[in-house]
Amino acid sequence: MSAAVAVRGLTRRFGAHTAVDGLTFDVAAGTLFGLVGPDGAGKTTTLRMLAGVLRPTAGEISVGGVNVVKDPEGSKHHVAYMPQRFGLYNDLTVRENLDFYADLYQVPKADRPARLERLYRFSSLGPFAARLAGQLSGGMKQKLALSCALVHQPEILLLDEPTFGVDPISRRDLWLILHDMVAAGVTVVVSTAYMDEAERCDTVALLDRGRVVALDTPEALQRGLPVRMEAVRTSDPRRAAALLAAVPGVRRAALFGDVVHVSLEGGDGGFEPAGAALAGAGIAVLDHHEIVPSLEDVFIERTGAPAHGAAAHRGAA
Amino acid sequence: MSLAVSVRDLTRRFGDFTAVDRVSFDVEDGCIFGFLGPNGAGKTTTIRMLIGLLVPTSGEGHVDGLDIRTESEAIKLRIGYMSQLFSLYGDLTVDENIRFFAGLYGVTGERLARRRAEVLAMAGLEAEHDRLTADLPLGFKQRLALGCAVIHEPPLLFLDEPTSGVDPVSRRAFWDLIYGLADRGTTVFVSTHYMEEAEYCHRLALMNRGRVIALDTPAALRALLTEPLLEITTDHGPAVAQLLQGAPGVIEAAMFGREVHVMVEDAAAAARDLPALLAAQGHRVHGVQPVRPSLEDVFVALVRREGGAVAG
């Protein structure tokens, strides 16, 4: 399988601050690649360099076989880039925005009707072609931005948090579109703060402070965590989470809805000390069983974020 | 139990568009009240009326016992408000932002010294109090914005999508702060798109096209979903989800993480028929099992039942 995107030693400094620090990864053609990491991890900076709009301080990038560092213009007809704030014209209609981007990308006039028809079909924006972009809801604006980015049928799609602030229904629609694109052979690189979205990627690069701290399939990342995790349902989830975080042998305890996820030291630690601590505080354990860590658990372990207990204590200050 | 917020037939029209349409609900003192709905459902418009930024077209509402039509100035001193676009000044330091908001709310002298220390501790910014706010990571900005919103220790806090775009670690830290405030008696009214955050709320109102279409505890809302839900594990979830949309007996099929959640008319029939249907298309099914619906499943089902999200 050939790499649609190949990155070697990619680095970007802003003054004394190193935003992206020696990134190396490949994105196989026709796959969905996720850039996942906390705020300030370097996701946006990386995407901007891949898109050829920001020059790296050091390192090599190849996108669609074009050396982006030497020839940033040369990669542009292979690539569509959708930044977080995509430049939609609020005072133009849906159709006029699409036409504008088709002009920018020099899409031949003869190809446009079929192209627009296809974009309308998957975006469901057809009935709103005459509506001003400024009057669309947040979810529909994102679908229009994506449609504009796709108007020249790129081989590679770079998306910076496309579901930022988008409701669950529009989020489902957007992801159906992305999966459609991948099924049609397009390579997609997407950054996201949603862990359920990260789980849908073929490969995930977990970024922290400008570096890749993990790179694998979501499943391999989840199975590779050297802790034993249990899901615990109790009569008082909030109090249980705070209490469990302080039990010796418990690395972290975090609430997922009304269930507490507990990670136990060493990988083979038993649940007894935790159970005893809960019983001692008069909290009933309704159920507990071992679980595969969620990608969010992996994220928290791998990015070295402070344990939940520390944050909880701070909150009570 | 007294009411922090009480709203009856609240309506707001913009021209011939009705953004909020005869909405009624109560929020009890000391609870975390979640406000959900698609973009454009009327959540922000409702919040803006409650905090006195927008006058209702009709209907009435009370916040902390004060009339939203006639006492909006008094309401502003009794509430904290944080929107998706934090109101912090990027070119002021952390300390200067805290002092600015303290000044707005008349927090001075010893109280200011105490609150400044508490807000810095809450945001985890003791060591950064001289830094320019613009240079802080988003998660810290957000905690500082929350601290500034509650500098005057209001009994009621309104949060409009406070965690949009924030990573999971920062989001958890933020919710720890919300819990801390609720534990000390603050009523929290929060709108969000993150369904796992909705799970943290005591009560949830679901808005669609300007109306409240469901209002209950997370557990009771889950029970509204009477159609069985199956989780299908397969190698190519996205393709399977697509294939199952519109398949016989399937109401909705969507990706949930890597798994496919399928809402069906008859669980037994679906568990029997769907694997065969998928196998015929070359998809191996590793497992089909009933699952407890997530709040996202509930949200999507209720909005679809109402005829879809607002168009525009």
Image (spheres, coloured by chain):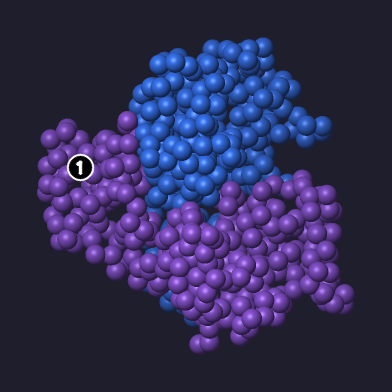
* One can see residue A179 in this view: no
x and y, in percent, of residue B100 in the image:
55, 26
Q: Residue at x 12, y 42 (%)?
A: A276
Q: Amino acid at mark 1?
A: Ala
Which quadrant of the structure image shows residue A104?
A: bottom right
Q: Is residue A280 visible?
A: yes
Colour in which chain B is shown?
blue
- Quadrant for residue A29, please give it: bottom right
Q: Chain of mark 1?
A: A
**Crowding at label 1, few (<14), some or many (≥20) Cα neighbours within 10 Å?**
some
Q: Nearer the viewer, residue A150 or B87?
A: B87
Give the image location of residue B55, x and y in percent: 71, 22
Left or right side of A30 for A231: left
Residue A200 position within the rendered picture, expressed as x and y whole percent measured from the top left: 48, 66
Q: Quadrant of the C terminus of chain A?
A: top left
Residue that appears at 65% across and 39% down: B41
User: Does A5 sit above or below residue A307?
Assistant: below
Q: Residue furthest bottom?
A: A1
Work out whether residue A80 or residue B285 is closer to the camera in this orientation and state it.
A80
Chain letter, colour purple: A
Q: How many marks?
A: 1
Secondary structure found at label 1: loop
In this orientation, which residue lies closer to the viewer: A271 or B222? A271
Of the pair A120 and A240, the residue shown nearer to us: A240
> As drawn, which residue projects farthest toward the front?
A16
x 64%, y 21%: residue:
B52
Pointer 1 residue: A246
* Residue extending furthest toward the right: A109
Measured as percent of width and height from the top left, residue B284 is found at 43, 77
Residue at 54% over, 12% down? B65
